[in-house]
């Protein structure tokens, strides 16, 4: 029972970290292609903490957003990489930790790996988030492949 509680608490800690890594993945490709990242946000609501372009909101820390400058002039392939950047970072960090992680500490990092893979899987599925106008990375990729444009 105690072990279940500890595992649950690790998910509470790791999910915001996984979301930040996901948003940094988008930001990394934006910067790589010479464009501006306006803001990286964790959560929703009023500001809890702000440092330069990084903002933590007061609630819903399982959500994140990377606000971009104008990327319209970029090639479709580069826009696809920007959209897939979060998924790429989630899969890369989880796989890296899985490969190099010491089995002795597996109980501590297993929740991070699972949360990272689940986040990547959810984000690759094309759908609109029901509580907002935002679209999943997968849906944005589908739109890019159809039209060459993002709808956000």
Image (cartoon, grey):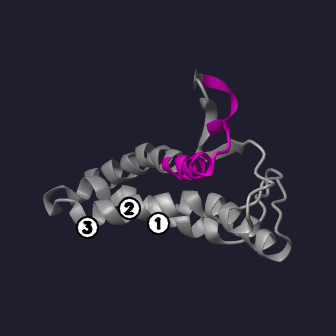
Report whether 119 appears left or right of 8.
Answer: right
- 3 vs 1, front mark: 3
- Residue, x 35% and y 66% (percent of image)? 95
How far is mark 2 from mark 3, CA to CA? 9 Å
Q: Which mark is residue 94?
A: 2
Circle 1/circle 2 CB separation < 8 Å: yes
Magenta stretch: give its range.
Answer: 21-48
User: Callout 3 environment at 10 Å: few (<14), some (14 to 19), or many (20+)?
Assistant: few
Residue at 57% x, 59% y is 85
Indicate the quadrant where residue 96 lies. bottom left
User: Relative to 58, does residue 103 appear above or below in the rendering?
Assistant: below
Q: Which mark is residue 117?
A: 1
For marks 2 and 3, the one nearer the N-term is 2
Q: Which mark is residue 99?
A: 3
> Looking at the rendering, in which quadrant would you find the N terminus?
bottom left
Whether residues under marks 2 and 3 lie with C-beta atoms below 8 angstroms apart, the answer is no
Q: Position of residue 23 (x, y in %)?
A: 57, 48
User: Quick one: 110 or 40, which is closer to the camera?
Assistant: 40
Q: Which residue does the image show at 16% across and 63% down from the upper left? A: 103
């Amino acid at each position: 029972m105690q072990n279940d509680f500890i595992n649950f608490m690790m998910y509470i800690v790791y999910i915001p970290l996984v979301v930040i890594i996901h948003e940094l993945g988008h930001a990394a490709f934006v910067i790589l292609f010479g464009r501006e990242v306006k803001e990286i946000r964790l959560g929703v609501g009023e500001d809890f903490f702000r440092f330069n372009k990084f903002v933590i909101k007061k609630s819903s820390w399982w959500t994140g957003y990377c606000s971009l400058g104008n990327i319209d002039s970029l090639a479709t392939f580069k826009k696809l990489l920007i959209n897939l950047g979060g998924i790429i970072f989630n899969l890369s960090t989880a796989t890296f930790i899985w490969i190099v992680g010491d089995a002795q500490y597996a109980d501590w990092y297993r929740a991070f790996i699972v949360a990272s893979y689940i986040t990547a899987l959810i984000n690759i599925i094309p759908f609109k988030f029901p509580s907002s106008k935002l679209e999943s990375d997968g849906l944005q990729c589908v739109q890019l492949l159809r039209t060459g444009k993002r709808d956000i």
